[in-house]
Amino acid sequence: MITRNVNACIRDIQKHRFQDGSGTQTVVHLKGCPLYCISCPDPEIRNPGVRLVWDPIRARHFEDGRIYSVQEVLELCLDTPDSLGKTAERVLLTGGEALMQHSFVYELLSRLKEREVHTAVETTGYVIQSQFTKLLPLIDHLIFNVKHYEREMHRKITGVYNDLIIENLRNSLNSPSEVEVRLTLIPGLNDRPEDAEGFSRLLQRIGVKQVQLLPFINQAAPSGRQKTPDNASPLSEVEMAAYQDALQSHHMDCS
Ligand code: SF4
């Protein structure tokens, strides 16, 4: 099929081997995100265009993002070998919000599926429902990052209500995609035992049976800037285990 000429702004395209050595994955980091998370470690990626950003470490400006066509990304994913001479067996699209540049994502995923490449997408789920529904059949593995269970609190910490996100998550559970729900525990925002209960109640109501817990990692943005909520430090292993216990006590499996 002829690839439609759609472009997207992409931060980075990386290849790496899976830890178990079972294959090679290409990770495509798309720019743009409609959320305003107060814990966002990388606010620069929110802008969906190419931007000039100051790098305080190298003391110079650099271009954050580059415009790629679908064909260019396909060639980079499928034809360019990694350091061990392997080409990608799986392509993961992430962001920002990977689905914000949805026309490009639709074309890219369609072409990957034609070539029988395993496709994975990491999303916040904040995507217009009709666009999300159109993309779902093209996604083998959907990684759904849920930020908060309570709608007012969700708006307070991300700038948007979670109604659309919950509806898209519910729909994805009825699709052929393998859905992985991730909760990133952010100190002071969603890390109390009562938050574990709140997540369990919401997620069970829509049919989620298992979640993956992740600690908040204070990554450096390309500009070198780091940002956390006030007094935030990642949860210790003991605190993570306690949260896991709290989820399980409310009948939610987690890893
Ligand atoms: S969804 Fe991710 S990229 Fe978007 S604002 Fe939140 S933390 Fe930043």
Image (cartoon, rainbow, N blue to C red):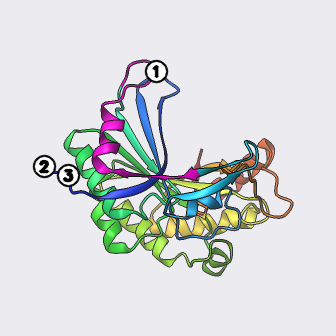
Instruction: Give x and y (percent) for residue 178.
Output: 38, 49
Outermost left residue: 1
Instruction: Give x and y (percent) for residue 154.
Output: 63, 74
Q: Which residue is mark 3?
A: 3
Q: Which residue is mark 2?
A: 1
Looking at the picture, does residue 242 appear above or below residue 38? above
Seen at 64% across and 56% down, the residue is 53
Label 3 close to label 1 by CB (< 8 Å): no
Task: Look at the image and give the residue range highlighted in magenta.
Answer: 63-86
Q: On residue 83, which mark appears?
A: 1
Name the element at disc 2: loop
Outermost top residue: 84
Q: Is residue 95 left or right of residue 140?
A: right
Name the element at disc 3: loop
Cα distance in 3D space between marks 3 and 1: 28 Å
Looking at the picture, does residue 164 appear above or below residue 73? below
Instruction: Give x and y (percent) for residue 116.
Output: 23, 39
Q: Nearer the viewer, residue 63 or 75?
A: 63
Say if residue 251 shows up in the picture.
Answer: no
Q: Amino acid at mark 1?
A: Ser
Cα distance in 3D space between marks 1 and 2: 30 Å
Cα distance in 3D space between marks 3 and 2: 6 Å
